[in-house]
Image: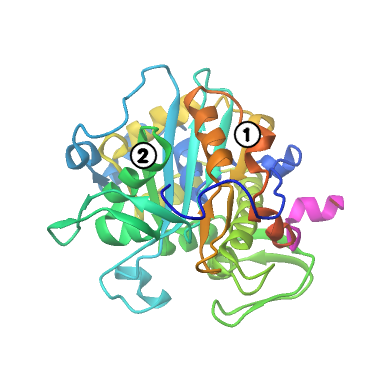
């Protein structure tokens, strides 16, 4: 990262987001319902699922990016970029005016180790200032490299291919797969599940997202759930870091709901949920069918929730713009080195991160089950 802030030094102490089995539940829902879809795809209803293969939008990222990528290391590990997009096109128009652009609203890198029994998930704040490489623009032409630009601008400029290229440039790690879910798909998945239960420990009010939740237990429908994972002003210090903490809490609650609803044992629920997901799903070309998703599900199904670690990219607020964050150089490299060498992310990787300031956002909600247990 070529930025005046991209060094070690200032910033308040950070902490890893790993707080016990319930706090780390959710690989299969890491991009909300997206990863759940990968698991559901392996339920053995291949003939039925083949009817909805056409729902999935596939992008041949390999042909767009060409050979100018990190080496593909055939060691059995998997690195997947999971994205939630804020496109307003089509059914997403009710979330705002469609100006023909979209940005990555949520981004997570999921690393599956070579034994396929451990996973690391790294969330990238969308306000992170990064070096974006030269990218092919979605409307034609080429966007020159940018030295200091927001991470989510990569998607706006060049879509999934530019986002993957930016992540690979940041990390030095080749992304094996790309999975994206839009707002409308997120809402529909939650509604298909009959809502997701959360326990609110502090009032959450956000006029922008039209979210108003008092303390207590709530079963959130799709619209409320989307407002919850998108709110920034309603929790913590109003930053994207607090929002990510809130998303992690929702991921855990969603995983509980998928399990409790029993979608694995009910073919109709399985089909309905998968249909809701795939209708709003974009993947790389190698995942653009239910059978391909089933293959990925088989590869990750051995990961136990106890062996999942979730962290936020170690950042600090930019001295030039307090509304932006920049990666902390040494700590960030420790994360990428851990993924490259297929090791757990060390505790030292999050030291000095501004993410610590946002911990109160995670404490503002709990899954319904956790709330009953008094955690």
- Residue range in magenta is 363-374
Kindly identify which residue carries mark 1.
308
276, above or below 236, in the image: above
Q: Nearer the viewer, mark 1 or mark 2?
A: 2
Q: Quadrant of residue 53?
A: top left
Judged from the image, the secondary structure of the residue bearing numbered disc 2 is helix
208, above or below 187, in the image: below
Dot 1: within a 10 Å radius of its alpha carbon, few (fewer than 14), some, or many (20 or more) residues?
many
Q: Quadrant of residue 368?
A: bottom right
Residue 282 within the magenta-colored segment of the rendering:
no
Q: CA distance from mark 1 to mark 2?
A: 22 Å
- Residue at figure coordinates x 62%, y 51% from the top left: 248
Q: Position of residue 49 (x, y in %)?
A: 35, 40
Dot 2: within a 10 Å radius of its alpha carbon, few (fewer than 14), some, or many (20 or more) residues?
some
- Residue at figure coordinates x 36%, y 36% from the top left: 177
- Residue at figure coordinates x 18%, y 36% from the top left: 66
Of mark 1 and mark 2, the one earlier in the sequence is 2
């Amino acid at each position: 990262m070529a930025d005046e802030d991209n060094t070690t030094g200032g910033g308040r102490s950070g902490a890893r987001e790993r707080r016990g089995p319930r706090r780390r539940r959710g690989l299969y829902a890491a991009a909300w319902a997206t990863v759940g879809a990968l698991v559901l795809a392996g339920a053995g209803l291949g003939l039925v699922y083949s009817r909805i293969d056409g729902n999935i939008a596939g992008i041949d990222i390999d042909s767009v990016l060409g050979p100018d990528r990190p080496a593909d290391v055939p060691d059995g590990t998997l690195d997947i970029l999971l994205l939630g997009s804020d496109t307003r096109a089509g059914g997403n128009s009710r979330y705002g005016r469609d100006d023909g652009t979209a940005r990555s609203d949520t981004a997570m890198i999921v690393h599956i180790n070579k034994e396929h029994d451990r996973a690391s998930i790294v969330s990238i704040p969308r306000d992170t200032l990064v070096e974006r490489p030269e990218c092919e623009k979605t409307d034609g032409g080429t966007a020159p490299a940018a030295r200091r630009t927001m991470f989510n601008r990569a998607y706006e400029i060049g879509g999934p291919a530019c986002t993957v290229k930016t992540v690979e440039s940041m990390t030095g790690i080749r992304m094996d797969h790309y999975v994206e879910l839009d707002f409308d798909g997120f809402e529909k998945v939650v509604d298909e599940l009959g809502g997701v239960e959360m326990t609110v420990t502090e009032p959450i009010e956000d006029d922008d997202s039209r979210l108003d939740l008092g303390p207590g237990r709530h079963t959130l429908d799709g619209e409320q759930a989307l407002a919850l994972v998108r709110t920034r002003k309603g929790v913590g210090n109003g930053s994207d870091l607090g929002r990510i903490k809130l998303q992690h809490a929702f991921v855990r609650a969603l995983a509980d709901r998928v399990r409790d609803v029993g979608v694995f044992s009910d073919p109709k629920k399985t089909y309905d949920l998968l249909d809701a997901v795939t209708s709003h799903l974009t993947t790389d070309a190698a995942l653009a069918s239910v059978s391909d998703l089933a293959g990925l599900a088989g590869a990750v199904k051995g990961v136990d929730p106890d062996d999942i670690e979730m962290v936020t990219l170690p950042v600090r607020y930019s001295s030039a713009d307090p509304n932006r964050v920049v990666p902390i150089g040494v700590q960030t490299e420790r994360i990428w080195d851990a993924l490259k060498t297929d090791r757990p992310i060390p505790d030292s990787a999050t030291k000095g991160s501004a993410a610590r300031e946002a911990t109160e956002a995670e404490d503002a909600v709990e899954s319904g089950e956790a709330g009953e247990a008094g955690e």
